[in-house]
Amino acid sequence: MAISTKDLQRLFVLIADDIAAQRDHLCELDGVIGDGDHGLAMDAGCEAAAKAVGALDPAQTAPTAAFNAAAKAFLNAVGASSGPLYATAFMRAGAAVKDKSDLSDDDFLRAFAAMAQGIQERGKAEPGEKTMVDTWRPAADAALAPASGTSLSEALDMAERAAHQGSEATRNMTAAKGRASRLGERVIGHIDPGAASAAIIIASIAKFARQHDG
Ligand code: ADP
Ligand code: MG
């Protein structure tokens, strides 16, 4: 079944709820290798995005405009580096589904992959540099890998698993981007907060797809 703007409203609420539940944990992770605000930043951004998308009239609003509203709200709500990174992600998702009134499974997967690409290009981080890219890149690759005939929820379950692994793998990395890059070897042994929040968001997206498929 196609994914409508009304479905996206539900998706953004799911993401905001799951991030809110992990807010303190994300701040703790950022407290170790950053400045301790990552949970607050992601909570504020996701909450603002959910509110902005929820305020739209789904009968009058195409998915691309919903993603753009999320991008703008996220950017305005967040002063930390995650602000422009996720704003770019949502803008790219919107651009990937331009002119569609409903999203097919393929459209949705293209939007998902565009988020990863947007984050990577905006932050100029490569996998292995201990950032959210270490979660997003393998997740997008996993979502796009399966042969046709795979359901949306199956593709996103694979993305969720890849995201989890990617996030865990940041534990053994030193950081080449962001605040943590100033700490050298001292960040080894600690998960990157942006990688952790990305895994939460991707798990929320997979949960949304399971509910939608089921
Ligand atoms: P700030 O570092 O400004 O306080 P946040 O705490 O919101 O921002 O986010 C920190 C996270 O942002 C890091 O854990 C990392 O995953 C991510 N990050 C930082 N710089 C980059 C970058 N250039 N590319 C991708 N992700 C980045
Ligand atoms: Mg921070």
Image: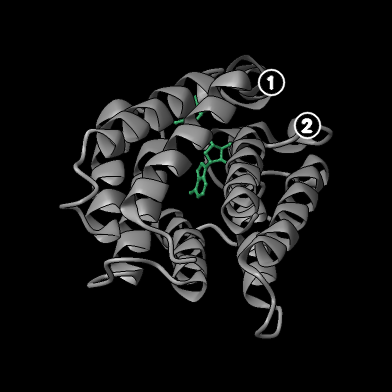
Query: Hey, which quadrant is residue 115 in on the image?
Result: bottom left
At horizontal 36% and vertical 52% (from top left) the residue drawn is 90
Relative vertical location of residue 10 with respect to residue 79 in this rendering, above or below: below
Which three-letter amino acid code belongs to the residue tagged 2? Answer: His
Q: Which residue is mark 1?
A: 32
Decide: is 128 above or below 180.
Answer: below
Q: Residue at x 70, y 68 (%)?
A: 142
In percent of width and height, residue 84 lies at 34, 44
Q: Amino acid at mark 1?
A: Val
The 10 Å Cα crowd at callout 1, few under 14, some 14 to 19, many 20 or more, is some
2 or 1: tag closer to the N-terminus? 1
Q: Give the image location of residue 145, x and y in percent.
A: 69, 78
Q: Which label is found at residue 190?
A: 2
Question: CB atoms at circles 2 and 1 under 8 Å apart?
Answer: yes
Residue at the image point whose x is 39% and y is 26% from the top:
47
Q: Is residue 11 visible?
A: yes
Q: Which residue is depicted at the point 59% across and 29% down?
A: 18
Q: How many marks?
A: 2
Disc 1, SS: helix
Above or below — where is 50 with respect to 23?
below
